Image (cartoon, rainbow, N blue to C red):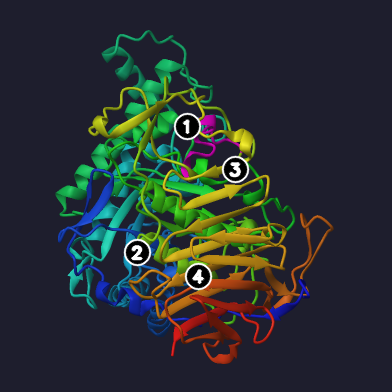
């Protein structure tokens, strides 16, 4: 069979080929189960239901669509199984609209009031998402550019979010409180509720990627803010009997043990004050601090918060610099970075993740993360990002765009990417429905000090590298315990490791979860997920021959692909009369061109989006004797019945030949 056949498979902004919303129809509207709270390591609604989420970010202008757009995008997300949207970058000055200004032209010299047109659009978007069973996470301080009439010193020298000064400056903290109160006490005329009283708004984060531990990249040098921090340090030093030299304190040096302790206290005091203020105005939902894996000290600083939030990426770059490596083929994936903020006794939500286009192998990412998250018991994921705008005519992957002078943001739109968003159906079932079981044993990694982890050479300034976690997310449930952190569920910990310990025997070139439902071999360059209701093979499966799972055999001719089959009923695959099969690997724009090793884009290509046809032989054990395999085109039409045969309890058919597609519905007649 021809293994390089390409076919158009565009994704439309206002609809989806498959509608999965019927599986989760009992979850509509969002908020019907009451307010969510953090309870141990889980999110729990008032009716006792656990909160599990598979979702996406709306970035900048995508938070303020027209009413018609809101209605269509909410229904589209529900069809994919998405049940949470994180509203991100609402306060970005470069965005049109943003929460302070609906359109460009007028020069507004303050950020003290919300634009009524922007708020009307945001209100209606919240209403539409809620009706479709989709919850919301509100970001508070992200990219806000403070201005002269805000009454701050040197606003022209403060960066986005006034990082890192917004963690301690009294004036900046007071302005954040004003923003937070305005937002949560805002009355939504479409839901008839203030934001603080709407249980569909499920969680919030205080400050995005904002901390004092990036001392080299963002040193505290700007006056009078530096002197304000020094005054806090000298007061702390006096309380703790720490000697401080007479000359000005240099906050741009690598901190010693005492300085780390001080900076931790600054962060925890900030979180406590901001959380207390939110509670005082009636906010009931779980609150997180900040959200990236800088180092153990920042992790420890999250102890006052209700849950931890984290960001995880496989690579960062743009079209001119592509790290075109496959996670499946390497011992260490993006999971160690993604799981770094998992404290004991707190839920963890991953509000940003991505393996962005034009990485050739990104189809390996969605289901690996969903399965690992289910194994770990993490609360959920939101991909960065759905879109930055709401422009309807976005028919190609990526775009050459500069937002605030940054060019790499053109790689992140995922709403029309078959290789990632196209697999969201199965990801939602794996995580929301619990198709992959949570691990039974808990491994605790005890950190000896707050500066013990090593910088990650692949990610830059993130100091979150420790051998113990390199493969742990795919084998055992784990938590990370900083020094001085008191775990309430000590009796649940069965294995204790140091950061340098390893639990997985790496000499075999593979990792198998303790539940037996996840496997990956970096030597053989493929992996699988094997649960009763969802089964997946991914990676370079064409090299593997026949991959045998429990009740399923897949033999692929295409070299790289993800093939996933999920039951669309409560029954396991063997008994189900309705199943979805998705097969996708490489996806790109028509006529896109790269250099020989796919590390530089030469031509971005043009619409339509094309996928490599995945060719494979499928043998599925099923009790249903009369089944049809339908190929489904991008518009949701049945384009033809794939020839199949049932014999001795096995349904056999081939995909990628007659009636090739990306989606196939396997249904009882």
The CA span between labels 2 and 3 is: 27 Å
The CA span between labels 4 and 2 is: 15 Å
Tally of marks: 4
The CA span between labels 3 and 1 is: 28 Å
Residue at image point 46% right, 18% down: 249
Q: Which mark is residue 136?
A: none
Q: Secondary structure at mark 2?
A: loop
- Given residues 638 and 532, the one toward you in this image is 532
Query: Does the magenta segment cover residue 589?
Result: no
The CA span between labels 2 and 1 is: 33 Å
| N-terminal label among 4 and 1 | 1
Query: Image check: 407 left or right of 349?
Result: right
Q: Mark 1 — residue?
A: 295
| N-terminal label among 3 and 4 | 3
Q: Mark 2 — residue?
A: 433
Q: Mark 4 — residue?
A: 565
Residue 24 image point, x, y percent: 32, 73
Residue 21 image point, x, y percent: 36, 78
Residues shaded magenta: 460-473
Q: Secondary structure at mark 4?
A: strand
Residue at image point 72% right, 68% down: 557
Q: Mark 3 — residue?
A: 510
Report the residue that reaches farthest toward the front. 648
């Amino acid at each position: 069979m021809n293994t390089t056949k390409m076919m158009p498979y565009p994704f439309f902004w206002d609809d989806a080929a498959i509608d999965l919303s019927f599986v989760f129809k009992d979850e509509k509207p969002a908020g019907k189960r009451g307010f969510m709270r953090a309870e141990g390591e889980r999110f729990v609604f008032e009716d006792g239901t656990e909160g599990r989420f598979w979702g996406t970010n709306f970035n900048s202008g995508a938070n303020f669509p027209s009413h018609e757009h809101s209605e269509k995008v909410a229904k589209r997300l529900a069809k994919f199984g998405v049940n949470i949207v994180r509203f991100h970058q609402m306060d970005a000055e470069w965005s049109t609209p943003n929460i302070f200004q609906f359109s460009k032209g007028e020069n507004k010299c303050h950020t003290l009031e919300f634009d009524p047109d922007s708020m009307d659009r945001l209100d209606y978007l919240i209403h539409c998402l809620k009706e479709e069973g989709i919850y919301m996470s509100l970001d508070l301080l992200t990219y806000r550019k403070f201005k002269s009439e805000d009454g701050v010193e040197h606003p022209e020298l403060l960066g986005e979010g006034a990082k890192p000064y917004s963690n301690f400056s009294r004036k900046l903290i007071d302005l954040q409180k004003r923003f937070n109160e305005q937002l949560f006490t805002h009355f939504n005329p479409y839901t008839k509720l203030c934001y603080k009283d709407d249980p569909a708004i499920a969680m919030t984060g205080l400050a995005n990627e904002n901390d004092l531990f990036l001392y080299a990249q963002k040193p505290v040098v700007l006056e009078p803010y530096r002197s304000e921090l020094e005054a806090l340090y000298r007061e702390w030093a006096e309380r703790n009997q720490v000697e401080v030299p007479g000359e000005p304190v240099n906050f741009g040096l690598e901190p010693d043990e005492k300085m780390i302790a001080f900076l931790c206290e600054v962060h925890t005091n900030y979180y406590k004050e901001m959380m207390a203020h939110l509670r005082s105005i009636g906010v009931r939902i779980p609150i997180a601090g900040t959200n990236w894996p800088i180092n153990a000290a920042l992790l420890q600083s999250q102890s006052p918060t209700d849950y931890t939030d984290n960001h995880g990426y496989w690579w960062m770059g743009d079209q001119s610099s592509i790290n075109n490596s496959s996670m499946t083929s390497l011992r260490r994936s993006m999971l160690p970075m993604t799981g770094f903020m998992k404290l004991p006794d707190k839920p963890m939500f991953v509000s940003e993740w991505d393996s962005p286009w034009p990485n050739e192998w990104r189809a390996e990412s969605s289901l690996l993360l969903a399965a690992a998250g289910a194994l770990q018991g993490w609360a959920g994921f939101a991909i960065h990002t759905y879109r930055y705008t709401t422009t309807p005519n976005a028919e190609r992957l990526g775009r050459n765009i500069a937002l605030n002078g940054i060019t790499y943001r053109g790689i992140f739109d995922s709403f029309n990417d078959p290789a990632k968003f196209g697999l969201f159906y199965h990801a939602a079932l794996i995580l929301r429905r619990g198709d992959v079981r949570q691990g039974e044993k808990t491994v605790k990694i005890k950190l000896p000090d707050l500066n013990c982890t090593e910088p990650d050479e692949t990610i830059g300034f993130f100091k979150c590298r420790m051998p113990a976690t390199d493969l742990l997310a795919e084998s055992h449930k784990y938590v990370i315990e900083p020094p001085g952190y008191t775990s309430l569920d000590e009796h649940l910990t069965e294995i204790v490791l140091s950061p340098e310990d390893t639990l997985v025997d790496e000499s075999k070139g593979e990792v198998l979860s303790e539940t037996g439902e996840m496997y990956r071999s970096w030597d053989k360059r493929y992996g699988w997920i094997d649960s009763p209701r969802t089964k997946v093979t991914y990676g370079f499966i064409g090299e593997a021959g026949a991959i045998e799972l429990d009740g399923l055999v897949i033999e692929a001719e295409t070299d790289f692909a993800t093939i996933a089959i999920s039951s669309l009923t409560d029954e396991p695959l063997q008994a189900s009369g309705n199943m979805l099969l998705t097969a996708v690997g490489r996806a790109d724009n028509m006529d896109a061109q790269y250099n020989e090793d796919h590390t530089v884009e030469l031509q971005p290509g043009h619409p339509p989006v094309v996928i490599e046809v995945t060719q494979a032989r499928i043998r599925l054990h099923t009790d249903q004797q009369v089944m049809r395999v339908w190929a489904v085109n991008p518009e949701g039409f049945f384009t033809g019945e794939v020839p199949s045969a049932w014999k001795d309890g096995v349904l056999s058919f081939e995909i990628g030949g007659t009636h090739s597609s990306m989606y196939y519905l396997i249904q009882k007649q």
